[in-house]
Amino acid sequence: DPLKRERSLPAIDLVVPFVEKDLRSLKLVIEQALKNVRNPISNIVLITPQNADNSGPRFSREESHHLLADILNSHTNIVVRHDQDVLSPEILDELERRFGKGDRNAGWVTQQLIKLSAALMSEASASLILDADTLLLSKKTWLNSSGRQLLQVANEYHTDFMKHTLKHFGVPKELKMSFVTHHQLMQTDVVKHMFPEGGTSLLAWWSSSTEPIGRDLSDYEGYGAFLAHHYPERVAHGSFANL
């Protein structure tokens, strides 16, 4: 925790995209984040696919609605959004064109677009994006008052991610480590620099992929490389401390 001596920490959002199968562990995921994130958390934003008639989450079991209700009752600052609330109209149109209406066949690219879209929409200074199968195990300070953030590194190195980041953003991979750590803080102004036209820029990022479903895209890798290249003074490297 390289920023552990920092005080007067800014508030951040916690963003957790999830699907029905994640519900049994989701409450624990949230509790562990609240226990181990030193920054105050303004909002806990849960994002999930919407059902076919747009009346609620896409769940197949009645039990799932009760599990979600229990999670919502446990904290007053939790909000649930659907994929369709977060993704821009042009992205939704392209997903339908490629993969059919109301389906999440393109799971990989959809989750990338959701995380980045949520970070773009945040009214907080930053969002901690957390995968729904990830429990935080140690205390971390994610952001200080001057905008310096924890940027975690790991050794899960995927060359295709680096190639696409260089191709689209012109950002070389200077640190021979990975930023894919299953959770990562994204500062709102940095994400807006990456995607200045919002959904239009995100769609261009996806369209520049050489893979049909965007397997060379990485939200965490792209953000980390962009931040480290353009804002090195705002980086405090830390090791991926989860199992």
Image: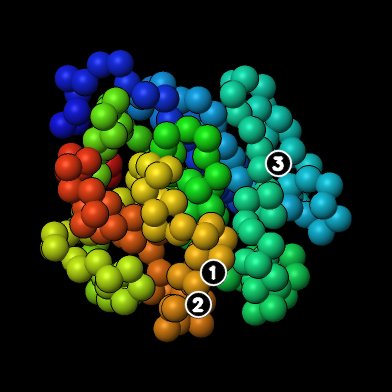
- Residues at circles 1 and 2 in contact by the CB criterion of under 8 Å: yes
Mark 2 neighbour class, 10 Å CA radius: few under 14, some 14 to 19, many 20 or more: some
Q: Which mark is residue 203?
A: 1
Element type at mark 1:
helix
Residue at horizontal 74%, vertical 38%? 65
* Residue at image location 29% in from the left, 25% down from the top: 145
Image disc number at residue 64: 3
Q: Residues within 10 Å of mark 3 (few under 14, many from 20)?
A: some
Relative to 222, residue 164 above or below: below
Q: Amino acid at mark 2?
A: Ser
Q: Give the distance between the C-alpha atoms of the residues marked 2 and 3, in whole angstroms.
A: 35 Å
Tag 3: amino acid: Ser
- The x and y percentages for residue 91 are 62, 66
Q: Judge left or right: residue 200 versus residue 65.
A: left
- Front label number (3 vs 1): 1
Give the side of residue 116 with respect to residue 218, left or right.
Answer: right
Task: Report whether 27 appears left or right of 211.
Answer: right
Residue 49 appears in the picture as rendered: no
Q: Amino acid at mark 1?
A: Leu
Is residue 231 in sight in this rendering? yes
Question: Is residue 212 depicted above or below 87 in this figure?
Answer: below
Quadrant of the rendered image containing residue 139: top left
Name the element at disc 2: helix
Viewer-nearest of discs 2 and 3: 2
Work out whether residue 75 or residue 210 is closer to the camera in this orientation and state it.
Answer: 210
Q: Which mark is residue 207?
A: 2
Give the Cα distance between marks 3 and 1: 32 Å
* Mark before the other along the chain sequence, 2 or 3: 3
